[in-house]
Image (cartoon, coloured by chain):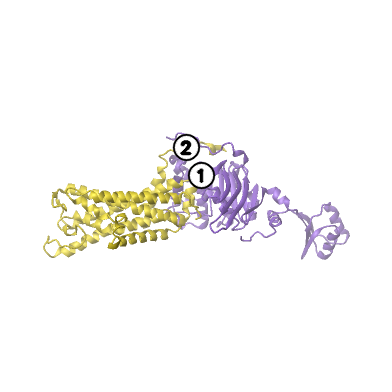
Amino acid sequence: MSRAEAVRGASPLWTLGLFRNELLTTFRRWRTLALLGVLAAVPVLVGVAVRIETGDGPSGGGGGGGPAFISQITNNGLFLVFTALAATLPFFLPMAIGVIAGDALAGEANAGTLRYLLVAPAGRTRLLLTKYATVMVFCLVATLVVAVSALITGALLFPLGDLTTLSGTRIGFAEGLGRALLIALVVAASLTGVAALGLFVSTLTHSGIAAMATTVGLLITVQILDQIPQLHALHPYLFSHHWLSFADLMREPVHWDDLTKNLGLQALYAAVFGSAAWARFTTKDINA
Amino acid sequence: MGEASAREPDGAHTGDGVIVTRALTKRYRGGQLAVDGLHLTVPEGSVFGFLGPNGSGKTTTIRMLMGLIEPTSGTARVLGRPMPRSARAVLPHVGALIEGPALYGFLSGRDNLLRYDAADPAADPRTRRVRVAAALDRVGLTAAAGKKTKAYSLGMKQRLGLAAALLQPRRLLVLDEPTNGLDPQGIREIRTLVRELASEGTTVFLSSHLLDEIEQVCTHAAVMAQGRLVVQGPVADLAAGARGRLAVTTPDPADAARVLKEQGVADVVVAEDRVTGEAPGRDLAEVNAALVNAGVRVRGFGVERASLEDAFVALTGEGFDVAG
């Protein structure tokens, strides 16, 4: 039996090897890079559009419409970060998360690689945790891609400097930059609910495409439900309901009410759908 | 770190076989019985052929052994431990190729192996690159290691799948149809590889629907048909179970057939210049003498050894290529 008998132990550090490899594999997929490319393009489009729109007339003026912050962009490029996040959070960002999370397990099942990972043996709980952690990292990276792209575009097209909060007080540029980073983190955290939902859907099917489509479909449905006044009682439980509360970080002092409600709701979704995904994935027959 | 936490799968139960199943049964949703009360014993150190037509329950059995699907009832022990409960302790000692290779097409062959190795928590990351290179070399893929696997031919994919099974020294190799998609040269190489691994002490569990493949490399075999185990045992015993046939080549087949019947040969069949029948229990020299005395011109005379295929037909009463 020779060397096969040699004792092999598993150090906890080695189990991170799979997580590292998963990150590497995810970010080497053409699809992942395409999604990030689309996300990076959104702030550029918004910036250029605002620039063209206000290029002729005198600056200032403050038109009323559009997402929050948009009227301020011409005064301070940093506001493009907030605008871009507000513009991508309702759809582009969660859609990208839905694609990555939905494909996480269903895609592996579809390609047949899931059975080899499990026979390796990756361990079902360990694989599920690895997948969820990777989707979370993708949430963060996707949000940062939007924020950084917006910051660069804003800096190129508009002046930078001190900024006025939504409460009317002035804060320095450095503090404004700090707030922007904080907002990006909150936006990334806002996506953990969708991520868990997508992963759960991913455990239900052997088709990556079906899982992605279902997750994105659920996202759109929830967004529509959130717009129907008659369903008022339901709204506080929809994962997207408090998403735009990140604007409260631009108040002086910061309003924490909706922010904590949002993070609590995301934690609830992560717990419920995370458990459901675990219950499903650890007991299901792998026939693909 | 690197501290040896002893979790060897060989306990007190290893004596009775590397794979032992008792009344193993799988009924899929919808009521289809894929595997029905399987009692399988794979002795340590054997090259075990797992035979059966497509759809006879071989792959379902393998999936249960590998902990991918839960048995409906019955038990399966691999390396002395119950599956799927002890998957984490057992599977690092098992290399598997199940229903063909599955690869990440956008990764190179080397990166595919690095990923599968990273999935095994018992694999030492410090030796990972060396082991991957050795596995690639063993299946002859070193030159193509840097190519994306979507550009691989079916044979190359099959080899890479085998390499993944050989990333560690294994106590058991489970190979499901390992020669699918390979050319004759590739098939010969796999056969050599299996013999080599077996001589190193690895138990090889080889499933196939090709009889001669099993007959050439296996020491033991089991035959499945419609979810049930038809027979299992050493290959020599299985083939001996079917008696050999007496074959006479002659330009006078009609006379030969008459004489053979007189000599007590049963089931005489005439096919052009060949006459065959069940070998009688008496001295064949006398049968030959009788033929010659009757004026039958004999070109060839002898007993054809029974093949595994004859054994299979004798056991199941049907041809081998019947899809379940």
Residue A273 in view in this figure: yes
Identify the colour of chain B in the image: purple
The residue identified by callout 2 is A9
Q: Give x and y (percent) for residue A253.
A: 17, 47
Q: What residue type is labelled 1?
A: Ala
Q: Which amino acid does label 2 sit on?
A: Gly
Q: Which of A126 and B287 is in front in this view?
A: A126
Q: Quadrant of the N terminus of chain B?
A: top left
Q: Is residue B202 above or below residue B213?
A: above
Residue A114 - label? none
Q: In this view, does B188 lie to the left or right of B141?
A: right
Q: Is residue A21 left or right of residue A54?
A: right
Q: The yellow chain is which one?
A: A
Task: Give the class, few, some or many, for how many residues have Cα within 10 Å of label 1's Cα (few <14, many ≥20).
Answer: many
Q: Which of B109 and A107 is in front in this view?
A: A107
Q: Nearer the viewer, residue A63 or B101?
A: A63
- Residue placed furthest toward the top: B3
Q: Give x and y (percent) for residue A180.
A: 22, 50
- Give the alpha-carbon distance from disc 1 to disc 2, as whole Å: 15 Å
Q: In this view, does A168 lie to the left or right of A8?
A: left
> For residue A149, which quarter of the picture?
bottom left
The residue identified by callout 1 is B87
